[in-house]
Amino acid sequence: MSRRETPLLPTTDAREAALFFVIGALCFLAALAALTTRGTYKAAEAWGAQIEGDITVVMRDTDRRTAEDAAERVGNLATVFEARILSREEVEALLEPSLGPGGMPDGLPVPMLMVVQADPSVGDPSPDIERILGEVGIDGDVAGNAGYADNVRGALGVLRLVALSIVALLSATAIAVIAFATHAALLARRDIVDVLHLSGAEDRYIAGLFERRFWVLALQAGLGGAVAALMITALIVFTGGGSNSVEIQLLPRLSLDFWDIVILLVTPIAAGLAARIAARLTVLASLKDTL
Amino acid sequence: MSRFRPDLSDEPSVRLDGVSLTYDRTGEVLSEIDLVLRQGSFTFLTGPSGAGKSSLLKLLYLAHAPTRGNIRLFGRQTFELKRKQLAAIRRRIGVVFQEFRLLDHLTAFENVALPLRVAGQKQDAYSNEVIDLLRWVGLGERVDAPIPSLSGGEQQRVAIARALINKPDLLIADEPTGNVDPEMARKILRLFAELNKRVGTTILIATHDLELLREFESPVLRLSNGLLVRDVEYGADA
């Protein structure tokens, strides 16, 4: 009757528990950083598009009917998603930070405001809006954000670069620490390497044992870290991610779409590969010391 | 798995020419060793502690490369061999280490079977052989015992069984009777002698046990301060 074969490497080892924790924690941080970076990209993109597309038209000495006629014609432009006249309540709300609640005097003349949501990727609709205002006989100013859109784009570019640098640095650190920790854990097993070597095992056989062992260990630990990152992300998405307040719009937009899942799956595989390669190089280097 | 066996019947199993070994910390531990062990010879190696016995054995079982000089094993210059060929040579050498070097998480059976397992053999092919060998060294009842549960003497017998399982062409033993009682020591050496006579295994045993040396009347090499003070070429008639 065949005996159950015990793996040639011990299955439980306190040193590996520490390694498991280190890899899991690093994968958690790396996955969270990658998801946050992607969220930052998405938020920057959305914020940039919104700023570039927002146009405000101030109309003086006109009645609401003429203003709404102008808004309808502006709304029909191919470069415009939506154009509408703000109600008095909305204008008062806009002025509230300056005048305080209910601080608007009843007789104060309030200009008509038209807000236009344009598609910045198609082109700037400002000349067309000015033309329409002239045609309907409205004295008004078109105030687009194009003037400082370049500055906004530059700032968002820097934001993206910083986020990308952080994730690249964290990923590189995670891989380096995993490789180093694997190397240290493996050196503690030098006795086993020696016994197998002197028993006639080929270098490839010994390296393969350690490679498989550390690949599985890092994969499991990385999966644990990725699942923890998934849970934190899900918590953020389901508790605060849906808010549309201005403050939230400026924060990274965490989500859980296809590419986020890809990030979570790639993280443990990268950790596993780092541990595997480190194990192989360490075993082969230690065997090179022997004949 | 095919084994590397050059057809060199007149070649000694071991030939050392001007071999020296220097460690970084302790300096030169072996100086200009010339040594020939003919195929089928049975030789003792003795000398005081620190004389270099273990270092000489390490060179022979290919744990280290010499600092100077040439080592020929089974007719091949070791420095010319590729790592895969060195592994094949190691499988022709059985080693009983002074400190046993058993894997604690494996059973006695698995430790003895280790050289066969790493050579890719299936357990069904070697199971009976391993059990028979363990029975012979008096561990028939401890086949599946974990190593930490065995006494020092029992562990030594497991180490001896592991060295013999591959039917080695060269058996190197470093103080193989150090942890067993005199009766078991004689039994072990009688097994080595039988292996030497029946199979023609070349045997080199490092020991302090002068009584055993007298009893077995085999040639003795003495090491002193890294120098081989007596080197007798023998074995053709051993």
Image (tube, coloured by chain):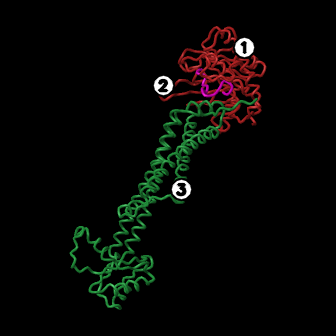
Marks 3 and 2 belong to one chain: no
Task: Identify the residue at horizontal 71%, vertical 36% (top origin).
Answer: B120
Q: Quadrant of the N terminus of chain B?
A: top right
Q: Give the range drawn in magenta.
A: B98-110
Kindly identify which residue carries mark 2.
Answer: B26
Q: Which of marks 2 and 1 is nearer the N terminus?
A: 2
**Residue B194, picture quadrant:** top right
The answer to whether residue A261 is magenta is no
Q: Distance between the residues labelled 2 and 1?
A: 36 Å
* Subunit of label 3: A
Q: What kind of residue is marked 1?
A: Arg
Chain in red (letter): B
* Subunit of label 2: B
User: Residue B190: which disc?
Assistant: 1
Q: How far apart are marks 1 and 3 (CA)?
A: 67 Å
Image location (x, y in percent) of residue B176: 64, 17
Q: Is mark 3 on a helix, strand or loop?
A: helix
Q: What kind of residue is marked 2?
A: Thr
Question: A210 above or below A63?
Answer: above
**Image check: B60 left or right of A110?**
right
Q: How far apart are marks 3 and 2 (CA)?
A: 57 Å
Kindly identify which residue carries mark 3.
Answer: A261
Chain in green (letter): A
**Residue A80, picture quadrant:** bottom left
Q: What kind of residue is marked 3?
A: Ile
- In this view of the protein, can residue B216 be seen by the observer? yes
Image location (x, y in percent) of residue A213: 59, 40
